Image (cartoon, rainbow, N blue to C red):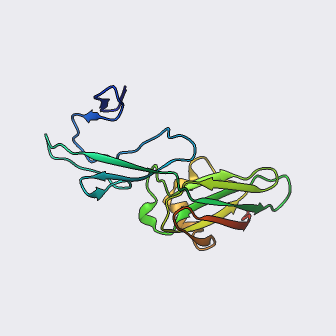
């Protein structure tokens, strides 16, 4: 299998080789079974799960990917302005350094018709902010400018490993 510059090297699907890397890159693992998440990606002894990696020409490295089934869960209700309006919940870390593309720390979910929502697998050990609104443009929840704008009205909470946290959010009309 081939994706970008990564080529699986063995039939076991666990070894891969990346060639012609001339700029920093990030490793990510997609398509995990329900109930599992990436906890760490270690290159040498350094956790690079959220960081870019840069190798010198011809440098080799070994990556170890640590998975967990001890997932966090944020659930709750979003109180609507009116019963027919849409309700989106956005959860993001207080630390703006983690507002990066493909961030594991930023999630958006639509509440169901009863206003209930659930987000599983946010990284633990973080202080998060939650916000509910009646309207979001596609991808707006990933925009650092938008997150900066809502951070002062968002509800703060902390998640530790395997924590289940319940929130009651009120929709902020936009």
Question: Residue most toward the left?
Answer: 58
- Closest to the observer, 172 or 2: 2
Question: Picture quarter containing residue 171?
Answer: bottom right
User: Which quarter of the rendered picture does the N terminus lie within?
Assistant: top left
- Residue 64 in the figure: left or right of residue 129: left
On screen, 16 above or below 83? above
Q: Position of residue 105 (x, y in %)?
A: 50, 58
- Closest to the observer, 34 or 167: 34
Q: What residue sits 50% from the left and 63% below the top?
A: 124
User: Which quarter of the rendered picture does the C terminus lie within?
Assistant: bottom right
Residue 5 visible here = yes
Q: What residue sits 34% from the left and 55% below the top?
A: 51
On screen, 54 above or below 98? above
- Closest to the observer, 77 or 154: 77
Q: Position of residue 126 (x, y in %)?
A: 49, 68
- Closest to the observer, 79 or 6: 6
- Residue 24 in the figure: left or right of residue 166: left
On screen, 94 above or below 40? below
Q: What residue sits 66% from the left and 58% below the top?
A: 89
Question: Residue most toward the right?
Answer: 83
- Residue 17 in the figure: left or right of residue 151: left
Q: Position of residue 107 (x, y in %)?
A: 57, 54
- Residue 22 in the figure: left or right of residue 122: left
């Amino acid at each position: 299998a081939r994706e970008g510059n990564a080529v699986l090297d063995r039939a076991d699907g666990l070894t891969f080789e990346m060639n012609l890397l001339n700029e920093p890159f990030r490793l990510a693992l997609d398509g995990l079974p329900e109930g599992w998440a990436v906890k760490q990606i270690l290159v040498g002894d350094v956790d690079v799960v959220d960081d870019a990696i840069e190798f010198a020409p011809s440098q080799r490295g070994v990556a170890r990917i640590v998975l967990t089934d001890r997932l966090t869960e944020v659930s709750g209700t979003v109180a609507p302005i009116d019963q027919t309006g849409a309700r989106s919940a956005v959860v993001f870390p207080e630390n703006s350094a983690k507002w990066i593309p493909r961030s594991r720390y930023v999630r958006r979910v639509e509440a169901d018709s009863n206003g209930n929502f659930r987000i599983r697998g946010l990284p633990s050990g973080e202080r998060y902010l939650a916000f509910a609104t009646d309207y979001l443009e596609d991808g707006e929840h990933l925009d650092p400018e938008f997150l900066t704008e809502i951070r002062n009205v968002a509800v703060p909470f902390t998640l530790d490993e395997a924590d289940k946290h319940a929130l009651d959010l009120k929709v902020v009309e936009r």
